Image (cartoon, grey):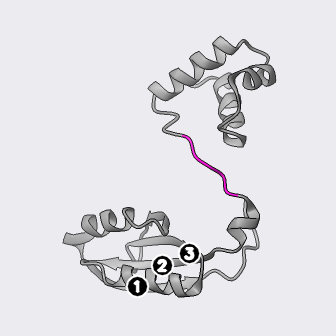
Amino acid sequence: MTTKADIALLSLLRENARASTADLARRLGVSRTTVQSRIEKLEKQGVIEGYTVRIAHDFERDLVRAHVLITAFPKLAAKVEQALRNMMAVRTLHSVSGQYDMIAIVESPSIKELDAVLDEIGALEGVERTMSSIILSTRIDR
């Protein structure tokens, strides 16, 4: 069971996963030992699956992104998913209902490289068709 204290700790870790145990303890008003034991408990429970890096807005702003809608042949969908998982340009993959089976969010440093990624996705064994939309700007990001 996750407590209010755990939720507060998770919130601080979302802000900065590299924060020191001492800093987290100070901000939460508890001991370092308490913070460390809560983190270990949350990791064991699978609440915390890992830690990540947040990229500076200035760096990300220069990346070219696209939403790629993908229809896969049903018997090969798992193979398509695995191939997409192995592509570093694929940032997120969603399974969706409707005309398409998946939506991949991809990013590349240039249009030329994005074009190559889109071609690579379209050529994957099991991909029936794709439709891509390049993201021009982000109006809301919560």
Q: Which mark is residue 68?
A: 2
Residue 106 appears anywhere in the view: yes
Q: Position of residue 117 (x, y in %)?
A: 45, 80
User: What kind of residue is marked 2?
Assistant: Val
37 relative to 23 in the view: left or right: left
Residue type indicated by callout 1: Thr
N-terminal of the pair, mark 1 or mark 3, is 3
Report the span colored magenta: 51-55
Q: Residues within 10 Å of mark 2 (few under 14, many from 20)?
A: many
Residue receiving disc 1:
130
Query: What distance separates the C-alpha of mark 1 from that of mark 3?
Result: 18 Å
Compared to residue 115, the image places residue 77 above or below, namely above
Q: Magenta stretch: residue 20 in it?
A: no
Is 25 drawn above or below residue 81 in the view shown? above
Residues at badges 1 and 2 in contact (C-beta under 8 Å)?
yes
Closer mark to the observer between disc 1 and disc 3: 3
The residue identified by callout 3 is: 108
Q: Tell me which label, 1 or 2, sits earlier in the chain.
A: 2
Question: Which comes sooner in the sequence, label 2 or label 3?
Answer: 2
Q: Quadrant of residue 38?
A: top right
